[in-house]
Image: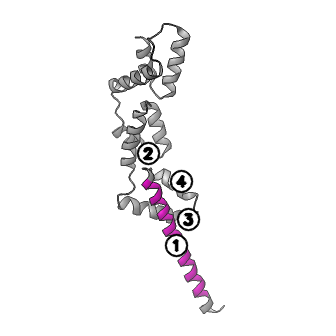
Amino acid sequence: MNPTKKQPAARLKKLLMSIDHATLQASAIRLLAAREHSRHELRQKLRTKTTDQQSIESILDDLEQQGLLSDERFTEQYIEMRSRKGYGPVRIRMELAERGIHGDMINAWLDDDPDIWFDRLQTIAERKYPHAMTTDQREQSRRARFLYARGYPSSLIRRYLSG
């Protein structure tokens, strides 16, 4: 084989990989500009664009070093957003785990004070059910299912339903 023909092919491949790397990095930055992502989420989205795992990990490492990608910042903002929308600690914890956030980081950011979550539970319940508390078992079951689906622990739901 002629070595002069091999060199242009190798250079072309290297050029295409660098273009692919730059395109991939630009995609990652666009995604992060729209909203925070966990490292796991961003990895999943980049996998749809390439099969080069080394390139993906390199880009993720670079973004973390530049301060553009942070699981800690993502966790803080995600908890704030979901709790403001009326979701409880059980559901938020599960959603963060699905997004690749480790339990230690979740525990560090998710406040487990039952009084805070009970106040949020009352607020969301009063918004959904503005009429007074009922003793009707069927209606109480309906309210309990709603609050459970929102991610509130059963102990807080029982406390709310008992008056």
- Quarter of the image for residue 107 reads top left
> Mark 2 and mark 1 in contact (Cβ < 8 Å)?
no
The tag earlier along the polypeptide, 1 or 2, is: 1
The tag earlier along the polypeptide, 3 or 4, is: 4
How packed is label 1: few (under 14 Cα within 10 Å), some, or many (20 or more)?
few
In the picture of the structure, the residue carrying the numbered disc 1 is 19
Residue at figure coordinates x 41%, y 16% from the top left = 160
In front: label 3 or label 1: 1
Q: Which residues are magenta?
A: 6-33
| Place of residue 115 in the rendered image (x, y in percent of width and height, measured from the top left) | 33, 23
Q: CA distance from mark 1 to mark 4?
A: 20 Å
| Place of residue 49 in the rendered image (x, y in percent of width and height, measured from the top left) | 57, 61
Residue 52 disc label:
3
Front in this rendered view, residue 123 or 109: 123
| Above or below 131: residue 26 | below
Q: CA distance from mark 1 to mark 2?
A: 31 Å
Q: What's under tag 1, amino acid-wise?
A: Ile
In the picture of the structure, the residue carrying the numbered disc 4 is 44
Front in this rendered view, residue 125 or 111: 125
Q: Secondary structure at mark 4?
A: helix
Q: CA distance from mark 2 to mark 3?
A: 23 Å
Q: CA distance from mark 3 to mark 4?
A: 12 Å
The tag earlier along the polypeptide, 3 or 1, is: 1
Q: Secondary structure at mark 1?
A: helix
| Above or below 121: residue 14 | below
